Amino acid sequence: MKKKKQLTTETGCPVADNQNIETAGKRGPALMQNVWYLEKQAHFNRERIPERVVHAKGSGAYGTFTVTNDITRYTKAKIFSEVGKKTELFLRFSVVAGSLGDSDTERDVRGFSVKFYTEEGNWDLVGNNTPVFFIRDPLKFADFIHTQKRDPKTNVFTAVSKWDFWSLSPESLHQVMILMSDRGIPQNYRRMHGFGSHTFSFINSNNERFWVKFHLLTQQGIANFTTEEAAEISKYDRDHAQRDLYESIAKGDFPKWKMYVQIMPEAEAETYHINPFDLTKVWPHGDYPLIEVGMLELNRNPENYFLDVEQSAFAPSNVVPGIGFSPDRVLQGRLFAYTDAHRYRLGVNADLIPVNRPHCPYANYHRDGDMRIDNNGGDNVNYEPNSFDGPVDNPALREPPLKIKGEAYDYNHREDRDYYSQPGALFRLMSPDARQRLISNVVDNMNTVPQFIQIRAAARFYQADENCGKGIAEGLGIGLHSLLEEVERQKKEDARMEPC
Ligand code: HEM
């Protein structure tokens, strides 16, 4: 018979009894010297770490990125240095609003976070399955997320706060239009696209800057659930997308996404008719066509969910030489938010957890802190400059200067009042059936919302597309007169916005 493995305490001491605790007499109380029980119970009591404040429910897998097209004229990032080059990666998908145990088939945006373990450090592309976002200013993120979470009094999800906030924040309409469309409930994580959403920058070996947007297009084809199909699935399988991803990879059916970029020369940002740093807008492909870059494949399930998926930590601030940030205000806000969240959720040494640790050598003067589990810098000195061969910076990697103009001020981001042209064009691109489903989704979603908010929201949709707004108003029993009155009110309100 095969010898069984010995059960031990955390410090390696063999456990004599894992079935009975020691008591004073047969029916007597337990003794304090039950140290195995104390360790086991204390460890269990601490199993849960704070869930992510957003994107709590997720699924992840390891994979590979392979370059298929030369883009070295735009970036010196080593990950793109030659066609055929492969880089290991970890990808986590997620649902935004729900908590850890919530359903995978909610109508919600999906997260799409990739950690590329490049030879010059980790590059994290922390994107979504949509190319735009609800807000333009990071100061509004906490307010926005509060509207997506449970009501603070009743602890119940409510459509009222969502539609109240959205209808008062016209810049959210583009994202809301996508959310209420067929794409609002992807069938699973394999059947949706991923987008970096923000504008980032590329720096090439001549130190020239380009603005760039990243697109990851699913090779499995887009597939979505209707609201009714999703509700049906949720009844018996709340982990539908997790199961689908795990099982596909386990059986060797490896999902793939093709990476493309849109490139804008640095100077064109000044004159392009759309603010290229506005996260609520896309760059039309006619102006900036998709350029193929490579293929991303997921091909290995994590051995253990908590170890790799729950403890993974992605940050838009993790870039590598050749990839940089942009003036997008929301991106700038995110450069703080994620590492701060990691320090709270996982501790100051979150980057040393195996899934987060770079695959290339790293060397700095950070020392100590909770859970320092590498060699903590060993016997190297912990200051710089030093005379003992410690690591030094490399000025050759400095980015070219970025021209900034104007005076410091809290500029009104609503100076740009074109909230409606892109969502309107998107609605008109949909098939008649898809438009009808979008209208029904909005109507069903707003069923329980007070009428004054319904009217405000319907008027926003009307400004994007008259038929869309009218369809929603009709579905909610709002008269045309009330709708048009609200449209006029909103137009006047927008016109009153002070120019900067
Ligand atoms: C997760 C903040 C906008 C995509 C998170 C987390 C925070 C956060 C604090 C939890 C991080 C963690 O505990 O590891 C913010 C702020 C935003 C913002 C302050 C705007 C000001 C966005 C945008 C996108 C996005 C625009 C996509 C384009 C994600 C994704 C995750 C996430 C995918 C999950 C990461 C993972 O899989 O671990 N966000 N976020 N967020 N956010 Fe954002």
Image (cartoon, grey):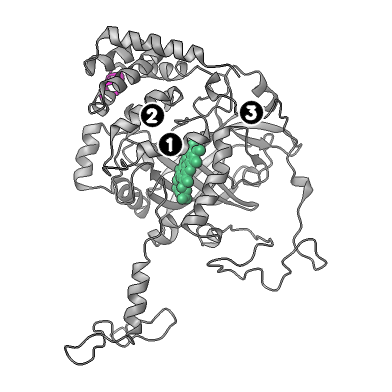
Q: Position of residue 113 (x, y in %)?
A: 48, 45
Magenta span main SS: helix
Labels 1 and 2 touching (C-beta < 8 A): yes
* Crowdedness near tag 2: few (<14), some (14–19) or many (≥20) residues, C-alpha within 10 Å: some
Which residue in the structure is indicated by mark 2?
165
Which residue in the structure is indicated by mark 3?
409
Which residues, given as a range, are shown in magenta?
433-440
Question: Residue type at mark 2?
Answer: Phe
Q: Is residue 439 magenta?
A: yes
Q: Position of residue 153 (x, y in %)?
A: 29, 42
The kind of secondary structure element at disc 2 is helix
The kind of secondary structure element at disc 3 is loop
Rounded to the nearest angstrom, the CA distance separating label 3 from label 1 is 22 Å
Q: Is residue 441 magenta?
A: no
> Which mark, by number, is residue 26?
none
Q: Residue furthest right?
A: 387
Q: Earlier in the sequence, mark 3 or mark 1?
A: 1
Q: Earlier in the sequence, mark 3 or mark 2?
A: 2
Q: Position of residue 173 (x, y in %)?
A: 41, 23
Closest to the camera, between mark 3 and mark 2, is: 3
Q: Residue furthest front?
A: 153
Q: Is residue 309 above or below residue 447?
A: below
Which residue in the structure is indicated by mark 1?
143
Residue 215 seen in the figure: no
Q: Residue at x 68, y 27 (%)?
A: 266
